[in-house]
C-alpha cells in the first residue's frame, strides 16, 4: 500500500503544472496530488517569514493527502523554505534549485551559465549560490524577466510581442557566451521555443522540472517506494481559488486536459501548522 | 482643524498613485494619505468576500489617520466593496466606476463607448452596468488587457512590444467606431500615449482618476471641508510591503519623487474591522 501512495507537488499558483508534466512523463505509473495556492499567488513579493508559513501550510495539506514525497514546484519557495520543510517533514522534499543547478553543471562545458527567473528568484541569487557551491570555477550571469510570467499565462507563446520582449531581456546574456541557460521559473518552459530562438540554438536550456522529476525518481527508489502499478497513475488537482481562466491556462501548462480540480477552503488551510 | 485633515486614498497596490497624481493636480493645497496593500496585491483574483474584508481593513487604516474623505483608487474594490464601505463609514467614499462612467457619458457624442480593464473588472461588467444605468441607449464594448499592468509596472511605456500588445488587444475596439475609451484600471494612464496612438486620435481617453479627483473636490466642498491653506499639501505614503522596485515604479506612477514611504505591519492591519 505504501508504494501506491501519490507524489505531492505544490506551487504558489499554476506554474508548477509544468513540473507535474515532467514528473508524469518520467514516472507515468506514479499518481500525483497537486496543490496550487492560487488565492495567495504570487509568493515572490511576500516576506520570507510569510513564504515559510504558507509553504508549511501547503506541505501540510499534501501530507494529509498521504503523499510519499513532496516536490516544491516553485523556485521562490525552493529558495526560501526548503530547509524548514525538510526539518518539519520526514518524507523526501525535492526543490527546484539543486536539481536544476546540477543538471546545468552537467551540461555546461564552458561553465558559463545564464540564469533567468522572476525578480524575487534572481535577487536572492539562489541558483548562483547553488551553482558556485558545486563548482567554484563557474561563471553565472543572471537576468530577471518579469514579463515572462504574464505572457505565459496569457498563452502568447508564439506572439511577435513575446519575441520582442525576449530579445530585450536576453540581449545581454546573448553577448556573454553562455553555453547553458537555466529556466529558473516554472512558467518559463511554456516560452521555451521563443527563448531558444532568441538565445540561439547552441545554448542548452535547462528545465528544472525535468531535473527535479529525475531526482524524484531517485528519491522514491532510495526509500523503496516506487509504485508496482503498470497502469497510468491518477492525478488530483487542488487550488485555493479558481480564477476565471484557470482551466485554459492550466491545460496549456500541463499539456493535457485537466480533470478533478477541487477548490479548498483557505481558512482551513491557514489553520494547518 | 477639520479642514486641514488629509484626503485618504487606498489601492491594492501602486496603481492608485496615478489617482493621487490627479487629486494633487486638481487640489494642490489638500494633503493626502495613501495606503497601498502591496503585500496582498492583486485583489482581482480574490473572492468578493475577501476583497470586502481587505477593503474594510484598508479604509479603517485611513480613518485612523483622520482623513476627511476616502478615495477607493482601485477599480476592483470600487466594483465590489463601495456600498459596504459607504454603509460602514461616515466620511464621503469616492470610487472609480461612477466618476469614470459619468465623465465618459459627458464626452461621448455617439454613445459608443469602449472599456478596457483587468480581467476581473471586465468580467464583472462594472462600467458597462454603470454606463447603462445612466443612459440606456449607450453601447458598451469591453476588452480585458491583462498584460497592461505588468507592462506599466515594468515601465515599458514606449517599447515596441507594448505597442504590438496594445494593437493585439485594441484591434477589435478599433473596428467598432467608439468615440470614447474608458481606462478602467488605475495602471493604464501610464500607457495612455501608446493606447491613444493605437486606438486613434479621434477617440477620447477617459482617466477615471481625473474624474474621481473632480468628485473629491465636489464632495469636500459639499461637506464644507476644503482646506484654507494656500501652501502645497503634504503627502504620506504607507504600504504593507516594499517590493525591491517599489521606489522606481512608484515614481513613474506618481510623476514625481516619492518621499515618506512607511511600511505598516500586516498583522496589525488584519485586526482592523
Image: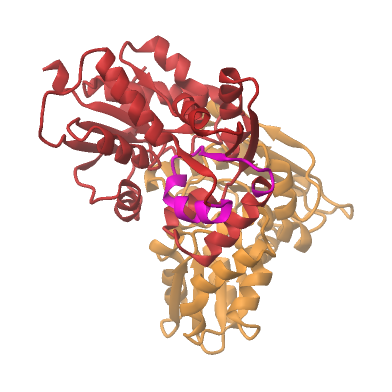
Chain colours: A orange, B red
Is residue B28 highlighted in magenta?
no
Which stretch appears magenta? B174-200
A188 to B129, vertically: above or below: below
- Identify which residue is drawn at 50% across, 46% down: A42
B242 to B209, vertically: above or below: below
Depth order, front residue of B246/B210: B210
Depth order, front residue of B185/A103: B185
Q: In which quarter of the image is residue B55?
A: top left
Where residue B262 sits in the image (x, y, percent)? 23, 40
- Visible in this render: residue A96? no
Q: In which quarter of the image is residue A20?
A: bottom right
- Identify which residue is drawn at 59% across, 46% down: B145
Q: In this view, does A218 lie to the left or right of B245?
A: right
A207 to A197, vertically: above or below: above
Exactly how many numbered labels are in the figure?
0
Is residue B180 highlighted in magenta?
yes
For this orientation, the residue located farthest to the front is B109
- Identify which residue is drawn at 64% across, 55% down: B168
Where residue A190 sits in the image (x, y, percent)? 67, 61
Q: Quadrant of residue B113?
A: top right
Q: In this view, does A243 lie to the left or right of A89?
A: right
For this orientation, the residue located farthest to the right is A231
Where residue A242 sits in the image (x, y, percent)? 65, 35
Amino acid at each position: 500500500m505504501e508504494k501506491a501512495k501519490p507524489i505531492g507537488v505544490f506551487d504558489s499558483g499554476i506554474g508548477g503544472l509544468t513540473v507535474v508534466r515532467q514528473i508524469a512523463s518520467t514516472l507515468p505509473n506514479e499518481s500525483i496530488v497537486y496543490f496550487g495556492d492560487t488565492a495567495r499567488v504570487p509568493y515572490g513579493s511576500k516576506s520570507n517569514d510569510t513564504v515559510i508559513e504558507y509553504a508549511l501550510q501547503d506541505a501540510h495539506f499534501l501530507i494529509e493527502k498521504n503523499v510519499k514525497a513532496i516536490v516544491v514546484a516553485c523556485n521562490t519557495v525552493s529558495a526560501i523554505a526548503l530547509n524548514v520543510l525538510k526539518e518539519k517533514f520526514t518524507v523526501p522534499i525535492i526543490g527546484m534549485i539543486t536539481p536544476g543547478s546540477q543538471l546545468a553543471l552537467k551540461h555546461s562545458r564552458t561553465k558559463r551559465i545564464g540564469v533567468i527567473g522572476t525578480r524575487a528568484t534572481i535577487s536572492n541569487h539562489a541558483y548562483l549560490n547553488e551553482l558556485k557551491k558545486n563548482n567554484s570555477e563557474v561563471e553565472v550571469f543572471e537576468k530577471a524577466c518579469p514579463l515572462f510570467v504574464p505572457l505565459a499565462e496569457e498563452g502568447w507563446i508564439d506572439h511577435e510581442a513575446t519575441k520582442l520582449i525576449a530579445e530585450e531581456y536576453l540581449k545581454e546574456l546573448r553577448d556573454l557566451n553562455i553555453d547553458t541557460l537555466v529556466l529558473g521559473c516554472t512558467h518559463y518552459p511554456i516560452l521555451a521555443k521563443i527563448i531558444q530562438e532568441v538565445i540561439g540554438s547552441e545554448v542548452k536550456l535547462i528545465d528544472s522540472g525535468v531535473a527535479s522529476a529525475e531526482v524524484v525518481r531517485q528519491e522514491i527508489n532510495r526509500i523503496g517506494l516506487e509504485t508496482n502499478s503498470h497502469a497510468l497513475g491518477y492525478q488530483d488537482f487542488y487550488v485555493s481559488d479558481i480564477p476565471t481562466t484557470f482551466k485554459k491556462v492550466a491545460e496549456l501548462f500541463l499539456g493535457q486536459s485537466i480533470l478533478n480540480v477541487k477548490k479548498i477552503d483557505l481558512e482551513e488551510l491557514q489553520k494547518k501548522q
